[in-house]
Amino acid sequence: MWLGKVIRSFRYALEGLRYTLVTQRNMRVHFLSALGVLLLSLYLPLTKAEALLLFVTIILVLVAELFNTAVESVVDMVTEEFHPLAKVAKDVAAGAVLLCAGLAVVVGVSVFWPYLDKLFSAYFKGSHYPLNIGLAAIIAFDFFLTLMIKGWMHRLDRARWEPSITTSLAFCIATSLVLIIGQLLVTILVYLMALLLTGTRYRMHDRAEPVILGALLGIVVAVIGVQML
């Protein structure tokens, strides 16, 4: 009897994972990113601690997305009409996912960069900061600065001028890589990816100001940050 309950519990849990993976685009993106990270980790001589840190971070992001889906489902079940508190619940759950994803980026840069450091050692020769720590600091600073400006504009009731956090991070990372590597092909590829993401954000919000401000803010933070390393 108890064995049947345990099996049903596993089946229900797997059904929840399957539902989230099938219906939520962000979960599919997280899964593909996790697979890419795990495949890359197989070819690098990671330590046990580094491998465990990557695994825990991946699970944290997936769990946050599961909770986000659960919150959205409960809110939609309670009310089908727009309600400010329903929006708050969904936004807070999405914010938790965003923080976990940002942590995953910082952890990924910190873990993988020492193994790829030879590609950029010439540029940062004589730097006072390790490259992985420096890039993680630039990305984290850009995130919190954009979030602060976004909150400030919201308090001033100027939602139209709130910079897009996603766009800001995308252009901050792209610009940092361009400044470090300095190759034409890399420049084209990273900015093409950033522009594709920018186009997606523009279609979602149908406003150009947040996307443009986010891109400009990310570029400025990257340029100043890389010069300070």
Image (cartoon, rainbow, N blue to C red):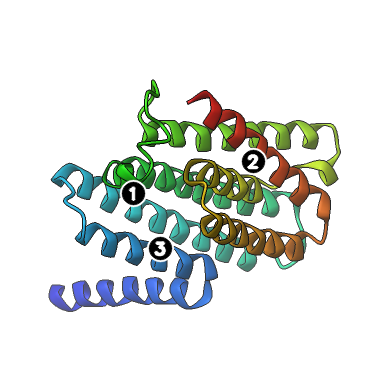
Judge the density around disc 2: few (<14), some (14-19), many (≥20) Cα neighbours within 10 Å.
Answer: many
Image side of residue 22 versus residue 81, left or right: left
Distance in Å between CA atoms under marks 1 and 2: 25 Å
- Give the vertical position of 228 relative to 15 (above or below): above
Q: Position of residue 181 (x, y in %)?
A: 47, 46
**Residue at the spot of label 1:** 57
Find residue 218 and name its label.
2
Residue 123: quadrant of the picture: top left
- Secondary structure, mark 1, is helix
Does label 3 or label 1 sit earlier along the sequence? Answer: 3
Find residue 30 and name its label.
none
Q: Position of residue 155 (x, y in %)?
A: 79, 32
Closest to the observer: 9 or 217?
A: 217
Q: Quadrant of the N terminus?
A: bottom left
Q: What's the residue type where badge 2 is placed?
A: Gly
Closest to the observer: 197 or 205?
A: 197
Q: Residue at x 21, y 48 (%)?
A: 52
